[in-house]
Image (cartoon, grey):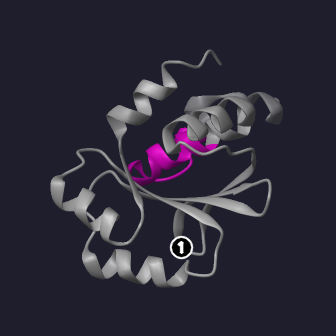
Amino acid sequence: MNIELLKQSPMFNLSLSSKELFHSNFIDWLITIDNQSMSSLFSNLLKKDFEILQCNREKNNFDLYIDCSGHQQIIIENKFKSIITDQQLAKYSEKLKDHNSQNVLLSLNLTDYERSLANKYSWIAVSYTELCDELQKISF
């Protein structure tokens, strides 16, 4: 089978690793196939203009590390099966203190606790519902 066809297949790309990474792989794949539409999505979601250049999975231990123009990054900690802890977010924030990044806590079922932690460390808390609402606006 043609390698290029496999690269275009969402199911192939989503199945590359465990189910725990499935959702991060899907976001990465969407950026790979249409970074312009995903730039608009993140610009709308985060209320700041972004032009995505590339996405990296598990770079520097972050679920998604998205390089953007202007030496900016979007860093996404994806909590699909678990809840972030104060210690974890403090550690990530310290690691990113010298980055020009927009840090995002993406959560399946965003709780008030997660929102307050995100706010405490100047992260943006985003639910999967909000992400899905933005995805529905795109025609890939």
Query: Residue 47 appears at what percent x and percent y?
Result: 53, 42
> Which span of residues is magenta-colored?
13-28
Residue drawn at x 67%, y 39% is 31
Instruction: Give the vertical position of 91 relative to 106 (above or below).
Output: below
Residue drawn at x 72%, y 40% is 32
Instruction: Give the vertical position of 113 relative to 22 (above or below).
Output: below
* Closer to the camera in the image, 29 or 84: 84
Is 35 included in the stretch rendered in magenta? no
Q: Is residue 4 left or right of residue 7?
A: right
Q: Is residue 105 left or right of residue 67?
A: left
Residue drawn at x 38%, y 34% is 130
* Closer to the camera in the image, 29 or 13: 29
* Closer to the camera in the image, 62 or 18: 62
- Is residue 82 at least partly visible in the picture? no
Is 27 included in the stretch rendered in magenta? yes
- Is residue 114 at least partly visible in the picture? yes
Place residue 7 in its image quadrant: top right
Magenta stretch, main secondary structure class: helix
Q: Is residue 43 left or right of residue 67?
A: left
Instruction: Give the vertical position of 37 relative to 57 (above or below).
Output: above
| Disc 1, SS | loop
Residue drawn at x 17%, y 61% is 113
Q: Which residue is mark 1?
A: 61
Place residue 129 in its image quadrant: top left
Query: Residue 80 appears at what percent x and percent y?
Result: 32, 51
Place residue 41 in its image quadrant: top right
